[in-house]
Image: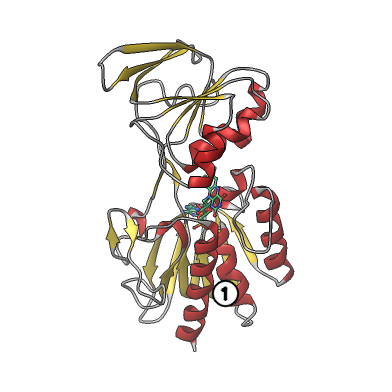
Amino acid sequence: MIYDIIIVGGGPAGMSSALYALRENKKVLIIEKESFGGQIATAPRLENFPSIEKISGLEFSDKLFEQINNLGVEFELDDVIGITKNNDKDFIVKTTNNVFNCHAVIIANGCHHKKINLPNEDKFIGSGISYCATCDGPFYKGEEVNIIGDANSAMQYALMLSSYCPKVTMYALFDHLFGDAILKQKVYSNPKIDIKYNMSLTSFEGDDTLTGLTFKNTKTNELVNVKTNNVFIAIGQQVDNNRFSNLVKLDNGYIVVDSNMETSTKGIFAAGDTIKKDIRQVINACSEGSLAAINAVKYLS
Ligand SMILES: Cc1cc2nc3c(=O)[nH]c(=O)nc-3n(C[C@H](O)[C@H](O)[C@H](O)COP(=O)(O)OP(=O)(O)OC[C@H]3O[C@@H](n4cnc5c(N)ncnc54)[C@H](O)[C@@H]3O)c2cc1C
């Protein structure tokens, strides 16, 4: 069995690629390692996608999945661990459990949450440390909660948590917030959200579960201890593309593409948050996914 196109990742970019390729009657397989929807599935609200005033990230993902499912996409839940050339034209996509053949590949594996990389971080995941307020926020309903981060994701988390928590404290590394003006306005005007600036986390406290956080104030060098059973970390994303570096050129980990979304290897395309670019939003991921598919279809013919 040989697929026309194999898509790595079932986020907005991967599913948009599938949509365009399927409408050209291509045989398409999407391989997704966790769950379809990607990062946006964890977002409480998507409010900046044209024609949809407000939708939850999960509902948006479900609708996109339903659309490609109705068009006959094939899908596999597995982790893609590498891509090799089979011959001059075809590719072998290797997953943890299987091997698939195709004529073209679209890499749309997105990004994932960055860790702070301090002792106890892995140990306390699920025992006080969370990277997803949508998933874990409701566990702290009615409690005071903490967020480390200073940009869009952190602000979205703060706004969402403030709808059912009495106080949300954001710890920002610098002396200001980054990100969208409209989100900043909402955060600044929300009386439940307190922002502590110039705070650099130095340790996660606790034995078996999180019991506190220690920050260093980078202006005064003062150590600040916060007794708490929770922290939401929203400090950005990182990519995981070394597994593709045998075939695609990377820049600082991100995949380099041309204006056709083609990588340094003919027949391998990439789209979405995984590529080298400035703006990482759903609308861009979908647009790049469509471009990758259109150009992959051209390549096939
Ligand atoms: C909390 C939050 C809120 C956001 N809010 C907004 C918003 O309001 N508006 C907006 O426009 N954008 C928002 N974004 C950004 C938006 O979600 C991303 O830009 C978008 O999801 C990128 O889509 P993508 O398909 O490129 O990557 P992703 O969404 O990251 O999807 C990539 C998929 O690939 C899978 N994958 C990764 N590696 C492999 C592998 N080796 N094998 C198989 N599968 C793999 C992953 O599991 C994932 O499902 C938000 C992001 C977050 C985290």
Confirm or reject: label 1 Cβ below 8 Å from ligand 1: no
Query: Which quadrant of the structure image shows residue 71?
Result: bottom right
Secondary element under disc 1, as helix, strand or loop, is: loop
The residue shown at (63%, 17%) is: 143
Q: Is residue 175 above or below residue 50?
A: above
Q: Amino acid at mark 1?
A: Met
The residue shown at (52%, 66%) is: 7
Left or right: 136 in relation to 179:
right
Residue count near mark 1 (Cα–Cα under 10 Å), binned few <14, some 14–19, many ≥20: few
Left or right: 290 in relation to 70:
left
Left or right: 173 in relation to 44:
left
Q: Position of residue 125 (x, y in %)?
A: 50, 26
User: Which residue is disc 1 drawn over?
Assistant: 1
The residue shown at (54%, 58%) is: 282
**Is 214 or 124 nearer to us in this picture?**
214
Q: Is residue 76 above or below residue 89?
A: above
Q: Position of residue 165 (x, y in %)?
A: 64, 23
Q: Is residue 94 above or below residue 225?
A: below
Q: Position of residue 193 (x, y in %)?
A: 55, 26
Q: Position of residue 80 (x, y in %)?
A: 47, 56
Q: Is residue 113 above or below residue 280?
A: above
Question: Where, quadrant-wise, is the N terminus in this rendering?
Answer: bottom right
Query: Which quadrant of the structure image shows residue 49?
Result: bottom right
